[in-house]
Amino acid sequence: MKKITLLLSLFITSIGFSQTELLTNGDFSNGDTNWALTGGSVVNGEAAFSSTASGGNAWDTQLVQGSLTFTNAQQYTISFDARADVARNITLAIQNVGAWDDQFRQDFSLTTTMTTYTATFSAASSNGNVQIGFLMAGFGVTHGVYYDNVSLTTSAAPSCSDGIQNQDETGIDCGGSVCPACPTPPSVAAPTPPARTAGDVVSIYSDAYSSNITYDNFDAGWCGSTAATEVMIASNNTLKKNAGIACHGIDFKSDRQDLSSFTHVHFDFYTNDTDLTGDVFNFKLVDFAGGSGEVSALEVNINGSTTPQLVANQWVSVDVDITSLGGVVANNLTRSDVAQIGITTTNLTNVWYDNIYLWKAPTAGLDDNAQTFVNMHPNPANGIVKFSTTSSELLSVSVYDLLGK
């Protein structure tokens, strides 16, 4: 029997919040389209399991729909009609495919009367491959089970526009609740990086340098969905973390980088989060060591107690030496075959970031003719140098970089 929802009820609900249906063919009007039935079939508009396995694995008799995308901490509502030939239990398991960890799991006690069951829960993680499964085996009974009107919705809280609180984007009052403050982007762009010669910088993402590396996938979807959106801040391209996403993967396996000679990593980020407890901005260089996957990684972890540290409402410029472990640099220094970069924004709600690159200082050197009467130690050099001469003449030294400065 198909459920009829009153138009008045739908209208009242839509005022307070918007709902998005995640399942297709939840009433089985199109047969088993988009559903997998193990041990059952669609009969008279219901998913019917005339008998179930009494033992074995719970999934030996199941009703499944997959390829769902979940967002961490987002609220979801599951609703379904079900009955059994004889009163019995079934398990509803909403899981991340592959890892098989639960987004939600609950047992339901069915009766012989078709009844609507509903549960609301918050997603445990972000994932782009989630399945909903009604598991019926292993309960020690074989009594038949029947389903109809299966619905999975996400309820979006009223959103704010133009920073207005207590109203949604249409100006309707939120019913006494306070809308979360709209994210206020930085009013100024990230600091402009210094000019560097092409051989002294590898740019991952920045307007400051002539070219970035070649990406295979700039947004690899490691946390289940698109991680960042490019926005314009004071005429400067900037990345903004998308809501509910905690990591950003940049893949360039076909343009792997030998970064062994690069001594520093740089990135700028901005957050307007005021409670920074437990918040972390993590930067990761993934080294493949000539293989097809991660072998080691160098990580830079920034939190509220590091130097530099997380600070609200201002750009934080991170420029750290990666030639040794310690401080904010952790894990492994190997970076001769870097194929991916990962950025994780643990607990940070709003983050903007820019100017992701690695650099090394230009080297100074002397040609062979000069060295007949002038010595420089070390040669080539990077930092402090010492000059000496075998000539009795007074020595005058001028040093220029590759840009002639």
Image (tube, rainbow, N blue to C red):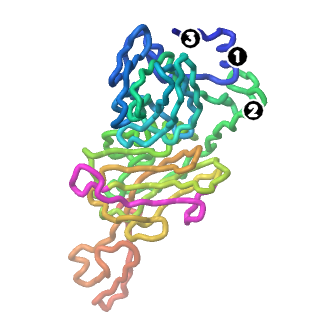
SS state under label 2? loop
Image position, residue 147 (x, y; %): 47, 18
Q: Vertical placement of 7 versus 317: above or below? A: above
Pointer 2 local density, CA inside 10 Å: few below 14, some 14–19, many at least 20? few
SS state under label 3? loop
Q: Are marks 3 and 1 in contact (CB under 8 Å)?
A: no
For marks 1 and 2 on the same chain, the one whose residue lies earlier in the sequence: 1
Q: Which residue is mark 3?
A: 3
Write down the quadrant of residue 391 in the picture: bottom left
Q: Looking at this view, name the residue that lies furthest to the bottom.
A: 392
Q: Which residue is mark 2?
A: 177
Viewer-side label of 1, 2: 1
SS state under label 1? helix
Residue 295 lies in the magenta-colored region = yes
Residue 22 makes an appearance in the image = yes
Residue 87 lies in the magenta-colored region = no
**Type of amino acid at the residue the image marks with label 2:** Ser
Image position, residue 299 (x, y; %): 42, 60
**Type of amino acid at the residue the image marks with label 1:** Ile
Quadrant housing the C terminus: bottom left
State whether the magenta stretch is mostly helix, strand or loop. Answer: loop
Q: Vertical placement of 210 versus 226: above or below? A: below
Pointer 3 local density, CA inside 10 Å: few below 14, some 14–19, many at least 20? few
Q: Which residue is mark 1?
A: 12
Task: Give the residue displayed 40% in from the left and 55% down from the top.
Answer: 284
Write down the quadrant of residue 323 in the picture: bottom left
Image position, residue 182 (x, y; %): 66, 36
Residue 236 makes an appearance in the image = no
**Type of amino acid at the residue the image marks with label 3:** Lys
For marks 3 and 1 on the same chain, the one whose residue lies earlier in the sequence: 3
Viewer-side label of 3, 2: 3
Q: Vertical placement of 92 versus 285: above or below? A: above
